[in-house]
């Protein structure tokens, strides 16, 4: 609410920079926009007005009126803007990275914690292919079934995915073997963790309560285990039964961190949505 109030004050200050002709046009346009369902949310309206005001002031300094720039009267422009939808490219929806990263952390990286175990690129490609098919089926059923149907459908998809992954692990030939060595593997894993962490930090600044931070605990736990298996002082321990136990516990802790952090993010999102409704 405080942020919306700040934007409203900024818009009011910018409005004063308009000429009398443009100001009258602007006031009518704002009233017309409020009648459009697209702008029912005041916060969204004020953010859109902020950008539009900047444009109108810019063209005003060049001697162009708001009506000429926007191409019509307030009523016509409001209807046009109300129908205009700006769809973001799919790659800008960073939440789509979360299930992919969870799949990577839960399925791909644990298999290469030990440097002696190679990354099988052919198997990895098949696994990602199966995962994408499962995600596509899940998205498809989400829009076509009730909540109970979606839950059952997702359970069936998950069980089917796990079965297909197990079958692929036995049948796919070992092709494209890549070893994450002590030095090269360590640098690769650290670089991967730093890149994902940087994206999560940046995205959370852009959109608070982003889902990406939910995977950071698991990411760094898995990275730490892989580094321990590559450091000379601890590599011997990681190939013993005690090391296997440590890897198992670390994997469970990483999975638990995803659930715990994800739960807190979900609660924060619910609280933000509730506050927005009250505003």
Image (cartoon, rainbow, N blue to C red):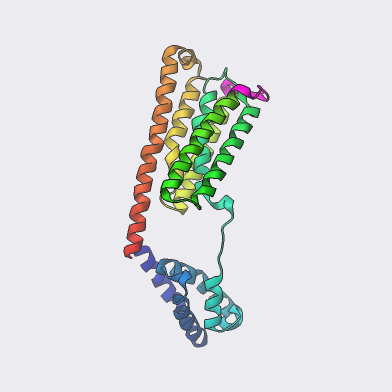
- Outermost residue to the bottom: 21
47 or 118: nearer the viewer? 118
Q: Residue at x 50, y 24 (%)?
A: 226
Residue 271: name its quadrant: bottom left
20 or 101: nearer the viewer? 101
5 or 175: nearer the viewer? 175
Tell me: residue 259, above or below residue 75. above
Range of residues picked out in magenta: 170-183
Question: Residue 191 vs residue 273: left or right?
Answer: right
Q: Is residue 139 visible?
A: yes
Residue 166: name its quadrant: top right
Image coordinates of residue 160 in percent, x first then y, are: 52, 34
Tell me: residue 233, above or below residue 2. above
Q: Assess whether residue 174 is covered by the magenta stretch.
A: yes
Residue 63: name its quadrant: bottom right
Image coordinates of residue 74 in percent, x first then y, are: 52, 82
Q: Residue at x 42, y 32 (%)?
A: 255
């Amino acid at each position: 609410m405080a942020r919306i109030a700040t934007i409203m004050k900024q818009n009011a200050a910018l409005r004063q920079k308009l000429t009398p002709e443009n100001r009258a046009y602007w006031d009518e346009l704002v009233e017309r926009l409020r009648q459009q369902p697209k702008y029912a949310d005041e916060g969204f309206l004020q953010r859109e007005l902020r950008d539009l005001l900047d444009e109108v002031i810019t063209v005003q300094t060049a001697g162009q009126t708001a009506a000429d720039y926007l191409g019509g009267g307030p009523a016509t422009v409001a209807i046009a803007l109300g129908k205009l939808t700006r769809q973001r490219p799919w790659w800008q929806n960073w939440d789509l990275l979360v299930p992919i990263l969870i799949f990577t952390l839960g399925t791909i990286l644990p298999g290469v914690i030990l440097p002696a175990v190679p990354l099988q690129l052919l198997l990895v490609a098949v696994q990602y292919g199966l995962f994408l098919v499962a995600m596509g089926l899940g998205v498809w059923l989400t829009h076509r079934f009730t909540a109970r149907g979606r839950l059952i459908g997702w359970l069936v998809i998950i069980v089917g995915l796990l079965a297909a992954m197990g079958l692929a692990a036995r049948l796919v030939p070992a092709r494209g073997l890549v070893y994450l060595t002590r030095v090269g593997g360590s640098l690769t894993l650290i670089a991967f963790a730093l890149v994902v962490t940087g994206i999560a930090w940046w995205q959370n600044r852009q959109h608070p309560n982003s889902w990406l931070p939910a995977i950071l605990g698991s990411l760094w736990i898995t990275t730490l285990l892989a580094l321990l298996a590559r450091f000379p002082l601890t590599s011997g321990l990681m190939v013993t039964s005690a090391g296997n136990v440590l890897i198992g516990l670390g994997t469970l802790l990483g999975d638990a961190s995803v659930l715990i952090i994800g739960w807190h993010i979900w609660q924060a999102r619910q609280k933000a949505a509730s506050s927005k409704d009250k505003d």
